[in-house]
Structures are given as structure tokens and as C-alpha cells.
Amino acid sequence: MAQEAFEAVRGDFDKDTTLEHIRQRAELFAIERKWIKYHTPRNLALAMVGEVSGTCSILRLVLRKIFQIVQVGELAELFQWRSDEECPVGLSNWSPKHFVKLSEEISDVILYLVRLSNQCGVNLPAALDRKIRLNNLKYPMEKAMGNAAKYTEYDTSAGNTDKAGGVVDVAKLEARAQLPSSASAAEAAHTNAQATQQSTWVHLERIGFFLAGVAVTCAATALVIRQPKSSST
């Protein structure tokens, strides 16, 4: 299974996957589980810091690790000492100067992720696709609906395998759970957006998981920042 997962996320970047495609799928995942209320800009920034710190046990390339932590730290600093009320979806109350600085720090994080993926030989678009599908298995809608608990509390096959340090056979579990394939999931995300908007192999796959996790969080952060604040009626 590790070999199959390794081959799935190893190689050059898939040229067909765009940031908009990732944004749509990340949004659909959150909407289906009623997690939008948890996805404030500040919470997403903190979640990204958690993902980066998790790489310390996987990546022992000190300079790369330092660069990533510095950039994510600079991004998180913009939210430091601010409440959720001061960081609403859309950041409509932020000055143009602070908004532009935030866009620059998010861009730095994504650029480092893209360069790190390239230098590690990780096909980031493919890793993102697999990670989103894996999250669908770890956070089934019937258990995670409106619940911010970690996947370890849901007692799923995918979650238990991941917690034990194994590699999840995503396609097999999708078939067992009768979940849509990658292609149909992407099509469903696109339709929804229009209607409303895993030795060395294991380690490499986990690097892919880390990169994918941070990239998905970045996409979600960009999503909530660009949304305008709803007006009161």
C-alpha cells in the first residue's frame, strides 16, 4: 500500500489542477460538515502553524524548516493579539496596508511549499487530491457534522490506520464507503461552487501530507479573506 501511495504522490506537478479547483473542494468539504463557523481567518492561521510544527519529526533539513517556520510565523504575527471579532471573514475592518501585508505572507508560504514540493519530488496537486479524499474518510459527514473534534475521536478505519502510522488505502475505503471517485468529487465541488460557490515511502508520503495540509489551509484562508462581511438586516 505504501508503494502505491508513494507512486501516487511522487513526480512532477499535475498541470490540470488549479488553485481555484483546490479552493472549491476545500470549501465544499467545510460546507458539508458545517465547519464554516470554525474557519475564521485567525483559526485557520493557527491551524497552519500547527501543521508546520508537525513537520519537525519528518523533515530534518534545518534550513528549510527554519525558512518555513519564519514565514508562517510572520503570517501568524498579523493575527497576534487580535480577537475573532477583529478578524472577521473578509477582513473588511483591516486597513489596506495590513491586508496587503497578509497577502504577501500567504504568498510567501505558498511559494515555499511549491519549492519544497519540487525539491522533494512531491507531486503537490496529486498529494492535495489524495489528502482531501483521505480527510473525507477520516471525517465522515455523519460523525463530523458541526463537530470540531479531531479525527481520532471518530473511530474510522482511515483514522485508526493513520493514527497507527500506517498508509491508508484511500481508493479501497472509498469503494467500501461508496464515496465518489476523485473525478466525481471534483465535479461535485465544481457544481456546488457554481450553484452557491502514508521506510522512505512512508516518510515521503507524510511529507506530502504535510505539504497538502498546509496548502489546503492556505486555500481556505484565502477563501475566507476574500469573502465580504455579511451586512445586518
Image: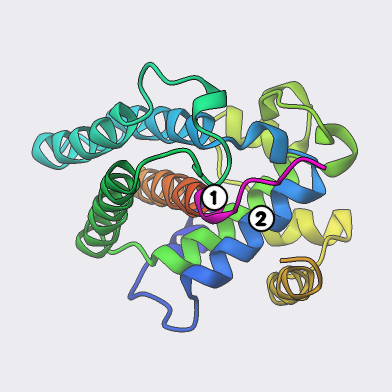
Q: Is residue 53 left or right of residue 172?
A: left
Query: From the viewer's perspective, is residue 96 above or below residue 78?
Result: below
Circle 2 residues within 10 Å: few <14, some 14–19, many ≥20: many
Residue range in magenta is: 223-233
Answer whether residue 146 is visible to the viewer in this image.
yes
Answer whether residue 8 is visible to the viewer in this image.
no
| Viewer-closest of 87 and 141 | 87
Residue 139 lies, in percent from the top left, at 74, 39
Residues at discs 2 and 1 in contact (Cβ within 8 Å): yes
Quadrant of residue 154 in the image? top right
Indicate the secondary structure of the residue bearing disc 2: helix
Query: From the viewer's perspective, is residue 195 above or below residue 68?
Result: below
Indicate the secondary structure of the residue bearing disc 1: helix
**Number of marks in picture:** 2
Q: What colouring does the structure picture have?
A: rainbow
Badge 2 is on which residue?
A: 27
The answer to which of marks 2 and 1 sits earlier in the sequence is 2
- Looking at this view, name the residue that lies furthest to the bottom: 16
Query: From the viewer's perspective, is residue 99 above or below residue 159?
Result: below
Residue 21 lies, in percent from the top left, at 57, 71
Query: How would you classify the magenta stretch by its main secondary structure?
Result: loop
Badge 1 is on which residue?
A: 220
Q: The N terminus is located in which quarter?
A: bottom right
Which residue is rendered at x = 57% and y = 59% of the image?
A: 130
Q: The C terminus is located in which quarter?
A: top right
Which residue is rendered at x = 44% and y = 28% of the image?
A: 46
Q: CA distance from mark 2 to mark 1?
A: 7 Å
Residue type (three-letter) at the residue carrying disc 2: Glu
Residue 67 lies, in percent from the top left, at 15, 40
Which residue is rendered at x = 78% and y = 68% of the image?
A: 192
Circle 1 residues within 10 Å: few <14, some 14–19, many ≥20: many
- Looking at this view, name the residue that lies furthest to the front: 233
